[in-house]
Amino acid sequence: MQSINGGIVIADFNLDGKNDLAWKQGYSNDDVHIRLNTNNGGALTATDFGTEIILDSELLNYGAISIGDINGDGKPDILISDSRQVGVFENNFTSGQFTTESFIPSHLFEASGNSTYPTGIIAADLNGDQKPEMVVGITNTNPVRILLYENKNIHAPVISLNTVSPLAAPVGATVTITGNNFSTTPSENKVWFGAVEANVLSATANLITAQVPPGASYAPVSVTKNELTSRYHLPFQTTFSRV
């Protein structure tokens, strides 16, 4: 394995219900390494994490890596620091193949200057507005400082997914999804059973019906509209039809 700055973090970056690995390197234009988890339920092996995605930015070495949903879309964003600044890789993944394009290039914020060595970033809602701020310590100053980046992100009208019924059904069965701010045009709602897209049968602003697609795995159901995604908190299980 390559050198690591700040340890390894774990999150489901590609929204398939499996925890992936990520770490910060910061050398040779390869700031963040992501290893996708492809395990299908058996004993873990090294090959289960053989798929690697590398994210690049202008950040250098030192610093650390952490995870937080900065823009409130339900996807894990990557927070990193180096010897003088901090940055956010925004997770923009919706469906299909997970690539370097699944993250928006890092938004960089100046910390306290060269060789001030910011710590790893902590994401937490400090002012009660339901948006996480970024808190980072500055270690190489006198006195030591704490920087607070207040989250001023303005959310677009978001969709929410409240229920999925049933949570176990065979391929071809109709599943009812309730929530808010769905499109009333069925084709504008993309329903995913894990990483497999489903056929949407009908849609209102608060209810979608969709068919369980072939290849659906033990994974959460999600709905995407206008690049905004909401994912149900429990996994769906595909069953077998009785003969």
Image (cartoon, rainbow, N blue to C red):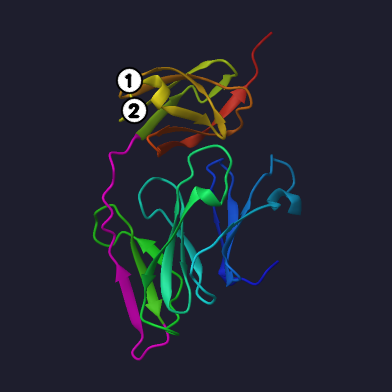
| Dominant SS in magenta | loop
Going by the image, does 141 lie left or right of 76? left
In this view, the residue farthest toward the bottom is: 142
Q: Do the residues under discs 1 and 2 have CB atoms within 8 angstroms?
A: yes
Q: Is residue 158 magenta?
A: yes
Residue 190 is marked as none
Identity, as a three-letter code, of the amino acid under mark 2: Phe
Residue 199: where, in percent of width, then height? 50, 20
Residue 73 visible in the picture: yes
Query: Residue at the spot x=49%, y=22% of the render?
Result: 166
- Please tell me whether residue 187 is drawn above or below residue 11 in the rendered image: above
Q: Quadrant of the C terminus?
A: top right
Q: Is residue 27 above or below residue 94?
A: below
The answer to if 230 sits in the magenta stretch is: no
Reading the image, the residue beneath label 2 is 182
Tell me where residue 117 sits by quadrant.
bottom left
Res 140 quadrant in image:
bottom left
Q: Residue at 73% of width from left, 42% of height from top?
A: 42
Residue 180, percent across and down?
31, 30
Which region shows up in magenta? 139-159
* Numbered disc 2: secondary structure: loop
Q: Give 159 or 177, whichever is nearer the viewer.
A: 159
Quick check: 169 left or right of 136?
right
Position of residue 54 measured from the top left corner of the image (x, y, whole percent):
59, 58
Mark 1 sits on what residue? 204
Q: Is residue 219 above or below residue 164?
A: below
Name the foreground residue: 240 vs 188: 188
Q: Is residue 45 visible?
A: no
Circle 1 crowding by C-alpha within 10 Å: few under 14, some 14–19, many from 20: some
